Image (cartoon, rainbow, N blue to C red):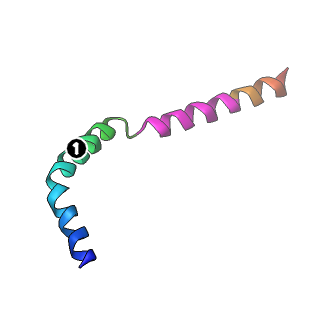
Amino acid sequence: MDYDSHNDYNEEYSGEISPGYRQDARHDEGHRFSPFLLGLAIAVTVLLLIIVFVYM
């Protein structure tokens, strides 16, 4: 019975939770490559620092 009430709770609020979740997902899709670009920038910076210290 406790499981059924918990399941009803999820179904009751799923209509309110889902649109916000989908909106957040669409918002995150625009920034999908931000972590990749940040990591790429860090990798390029480290490589440039290594090159500078090797040739100095």
Label 1 secondary element: helix
x and y, in percent, of residue 44 in the image: 62, 31
x and y, in percent, of residue 40 in the image: 55, 36
x and y, in percent, of residue 21 in the image: 25, 47
The residue stretch that appears in magenta: 33-47
Mark 1 closeness class: few <14, some 14–19, many ≥20 residues within 10 Å: few
Q: Quadrant of the C terminus?
A: top right
Is 7 placed left or right of 38 in the picture? left
Residue at the far front: name it. 1
Q: Nearer the viewer, residue 4 or 21?
A: 4
Residue drawn 38% across and 40% down?
32
Q: Is residue 38 magenta?
A: yes
Is 42 placed left or right of 38 in the picture? right
Helix, strand or loop: magenta stretch: helix
Residue drawn 17% across and 46% down?
19
Residue identified by numbered label 1: 20
Residue drawn 77% across and 23% down?
52
Q: Amino acid at mark 1?
A: Gly
Q: Is residue 26 magenta?
A: no
Q: Quadrant of residue 13?
A: bottom left
Q: Quadrant of the N terminus?
A: bottom left
Q: Quadrant of residue 41?
A: top right
Residue at the far bottom: name it. 1
Is 2 placed left or right of 44 in the picture? left
Residue drawn 20% across and 51% down?
18
Count the marks: 1
Is 50 placed left or right of 41 in the picture? right
